[in-house]
Image (spheres, rainbow, N blue to C red):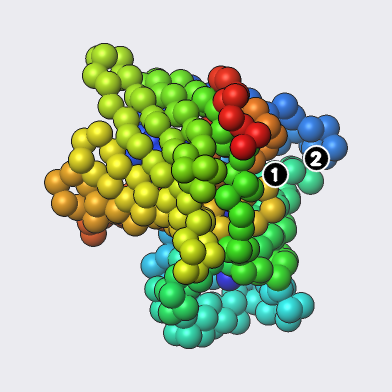
Amino acid sequence: MGIHRIQASALLGVCFLGLFASEPIKTCAQSAEPSSRNILLAVDSEVEQAIRDSAQSFVDAFNKGDAQAIAALWTKDGELVDETGFRTSGRAAIEEQYKTFFTENPGAKIEVAINSIRQISQDSAMEDGQSLLTLASSAGTMASGTYVAVHVKENGKWLMASVRESAARPLKSELNLKDLAWLIGTWAVSGDDAKFEVTYDWLGNGNFIRGETTVLSDEGKPSGGTQIIGKDPLTGRIVSWSFNADGGLGYGEWAKEGAHWLIRTQGVTADGMPTSAVNILYDADNNVHSWQSVNRTVGDQILPRTKEVVIERKSASKSAEK
């Protein structure tokens, strides 16, 4: 993808820290109904997986600052049209553009969330999605954008022939805690290894939201944690503090882009290992949401993104209209 191919997606799991490690039974992909408007040909599962693998390869190469590996995902004569409308043609030129970007933005990280994959012909397909870019050189500034990519199959391999990006927009940080009023109530997720519930309610005359999470594994061992969400009076940002039953803790800064909440977290495990992640929470409607955690690290180890999961409202709180 292009430079801003970082897609948004977040966490309502164990206090938004991405510490819930079980594999959910119900993923967003499994629960969504197919839309005939987005299908030109039935998308072959192997085609879809190949394009998703390409997206992951792009993310991996981008986060390593590997311009050559990124360019290898394009056809020889592929083109990239960035958010300003500037067109770069040819694999070699695309590689040089990424080299320049990485030189000017060391430590930049990207994530992508694919919205749809549509097969145009047996040897061509279209992908569109959203992006989330984090610039280390700008105090962790995050920006989001969208992209459309056309893939073609050459010599048995799916490559990008054309990518067009939208303008990346800084994420909105001046928010009111009432923007999270929809959280109030009890939410549930069932997974292969564990089930959890999280209940949110108002605290401190409506100046904070408190979340209580309970996790019960198949072995019957309970765990969970507490989260407090509030607005920092100095910065105007919505922030959160999370305390896990095992002794770990974390801090998060919240931003919003459309229906996506992005929570950049830092924390420490009970045994002293530093953690970080970007959690993406999608506000689908009043009763169903999705969550995913990306850019995850524990100590010096980079962890894979979690699966995107569906979180469903179990009951509403009487104090939801605080």
Residue shown at 61%/54% (left/top)?
Answer: 176
Quadrant where the N terminus is found in the figure: bottom right
Q: Residues within 10 Å of mark 2 (few under 14, many from 20)?
A: few
Q: Residue furthest front?
A: 205
Residue 285 in view (yes/no): yes
Is 7 left, or right, of 228 in this rendering? right
Residue marked by disc 1: 116
Is residue 128 placed above or below 104 in the rendered structure? above
Q: Quadrant of residue 145?
A: bottom right
Residue shown at 56%/40% (left/top)?
Answer: 49
- Label 1 element class: strand
Q: Quadrant of residue 44?
A: top right
Is residue 165 placed above or below 50 in the rendered structure? below
- Label 2 element class: helix
Q: Amino acid at mark 1?
A: Ser
Is residue 47 placed above or below 144 in the rendered structure? above
Q: Residue furthest right?
A: 37
Which label is found at residue 166?
A: none
Disc 1 + disc 2, Cβ < 8 Å: yes
Residue 34 screen position, x and y as percent:
74, 29
Q: Amino acid at mark 2?
A: Asn
Residue marked by disc 2: 38
Residue shown at 59%/67% (left/top)?
Answer: 143
Q: Nearer the viewer, residue 37 or 202?
A: 202
Query: Of marks 1 and 2, which one's residue comes earlier in the chain?
Result: 2
Residue 270 screen position, x and y as percent:
18, 44
